[in-house]
Image (tube, rainbow, N blue to C red):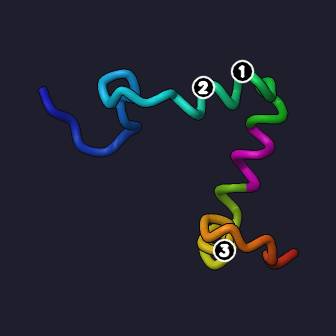
Amino acid sequence: GEQLGGTPDFELMGVPNVPDRARAELGDERYEAAAARGRAMPMDDVINLARGDTAVSRG
């Protein structure tokens, strides 16, 4: 059946599973630290990074 929410099925979408690849390259500890920093990042910083702007707050 269909399910709302959760993570996308990358294999069905035909795109690489970026989180799994990042975890494999960084290792569990570094990946979890980076993911935690990303989750804590202010939305303005997320938008700036997506736009390619390197100026982010240091909050």
Residue 41 appears at what percent x and percent y? 70, 66
User: Which numbered tag is attached to residue 48?
Assistant: 3
Residue 45 appears at what percent x and percent y? 69, 73
Residue shown at 24% from the left, 43% from the top: 4
Left or right side of 47 for 1: left
Q: Check if residue 35 falls in the magenta segment.
A: yes
Left or right side of 47 for 53: right
Q: Quadrant of the C terminus?
A: bottom right
Q: Quadrant of the N terminus?
A: top left
Q: Which residues are magenta?
A: 32-37
Mark 1 lies on residue: 24
Q: Amino acid at mark 3?
A: Asn
Element at label 1:
helix
Q: Amino acid at mark 1?
A: Ala
Asked whether the residues under the numbered discs 1 and 2 touch, taking CB atoms below 8 Å apart as contact, a structural biologist would say yes
Residue 15, quarter of the rendered image: top left
- Name the foreground residue: 15 vs 3: 15
User: Which numbered tag is attached to residue 20?
Assistant: 2
Residue shown at 61% from the left, 65% from the top: 50
Marks 1 and 3, Cα distance to the nearest angstrom? Answer: 27 Å
Q: Check if residue 7 falls in the magenta segment.
A: no
Residue shown at 31% from the left, 45% from the top: 5
Element at label 3:
helix
